[in-house]
Image: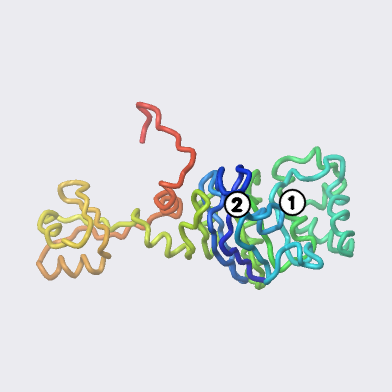
Amino acid sequence: MTIRAHGLTKRYGGKTGKTGRTAVDDLTFTVEPGTVTGFLGPNGAGKSTTMRMLLGLDAPTAGRATIGGRSYAAHPAPLTEVGALLEAKAVHPGRTAFHHLMALALTHGIPRSRVEAVLDLAGLTEVAGKRVKGFSLGMGQRLGIAAALVGDPATIILDEPVNGLDPEGVLWIRTLLKSLARQGRTVLVSSHLMSEMALTADHLVVIGRGRLLADTTVADLVRESGAAYVKVVTPEAARLRALLPGAEVTVEAPDTLHVRGADAPAIGRIAADHGLPLSELTPQTASLEQAFMDLTHDAVEYQATTPVGAAA
């Protein structure tokens, strides 16, 4: 089922809704089945508010959010169509993991066998009878993911699912999300771990200050980032630089150039045509983290300063 946000806006404060703080501002994007879509943005960007509007927990000031062509509330059996994890701690602490999931399952006629299956999938079978108040943060995350999957939904929406997970748990959720997408399900997941998103997500929706900044693939975002460049080492650096008027060239050392706006094959051809020797010609690909930082630099709401004397 396709997730669609069209003109989503959420304002807080002001008697008419026309003043006050705008958390989400005319946001439009689509999340397609069969892919893992990463939902990224700095703190305060409006990610959680957007997810809450997708799930009908917050009413938009303007715009519309649909899943499979209808609002979440209009689905006759939402748990079997849309699974979500927004807050892993939203569980009665006195319940066991098994009884928490059974309580959810009974509202939709989901059999006990499915509860047992998701407990096993999440690695919680051995602690199924343990009260949730004794769970670690990672165990709570696993239970929240199990709850999102108990209805075997076609659409999965997860907010920071790897929070609190150990390395084995991070690998598990990465593998799980990719598997769900391969099954043709729609997967929308937010995370602040760029390294993990680089390994997990196929597509990205990036927002800042409530506005859409990018709706693209991971590869395209990284490729288009200004952080990518070509490292060129040549004793004729000055001459080569003069032959690249359309590129952005930074002199790193007397014989070393960092070139943006021209790829390695083009630079190599220019050097060969003019008889300039090259001892290194290496494309330097930006990381998703660097591409994200560059894209959202002006949209960061809370910026810390670097202490005087701190190492770069």
Pick whichever, 60 or 200, lies toward us: 60
Label 2 environment density (alpha carbons within 10 Å; few <14, some 14–19, many ≥20): many
Q: How many marks are shown on the rendered structure?
A: 2
Which quadrant holds the C terminus?
top left
Disc 1 on helix, strand or loop? Answer: helix
Residue under label 2, please give it.
Answer: 10
Report the amino acid beneath label 2.
Lys
The residue positioned farthest toward the top in the image shown: 308
Report the residue marked by disc 1: 144
Q: Position of residue 207 (x, y in %)?
A: 51, 54
Front one among 2 and 264 = 2
Q: Quadrant of residue 139?
A: top right
Instruction: Decide if residue 290 is on the left or right side of residue 116.
Output: left
Q: Dot 1, crowdedness within 10 Å: few (<14), some or many (≥20)?
A: many
Left or right of residue 162: residue 203: left
Element under label 2?
strand
- Left or right of 134? Residue 218 is left
Q: What quarter of the picture does the N terminus occupy?
A: bottom right
Between label 2 and label 1, give the one nearer the viewer: 2
User: Which labelled disc corresponds to residue 101?
Assistant: none
303 shown above or below 51:
above
- Earlier along the polypeptide chain: callout 2 or callout 1? 2
> Which residue lies at the image location 62% right of the left edge and 50% below the top edge?
48
Tell me which amino acid carries mark 1.
Gly
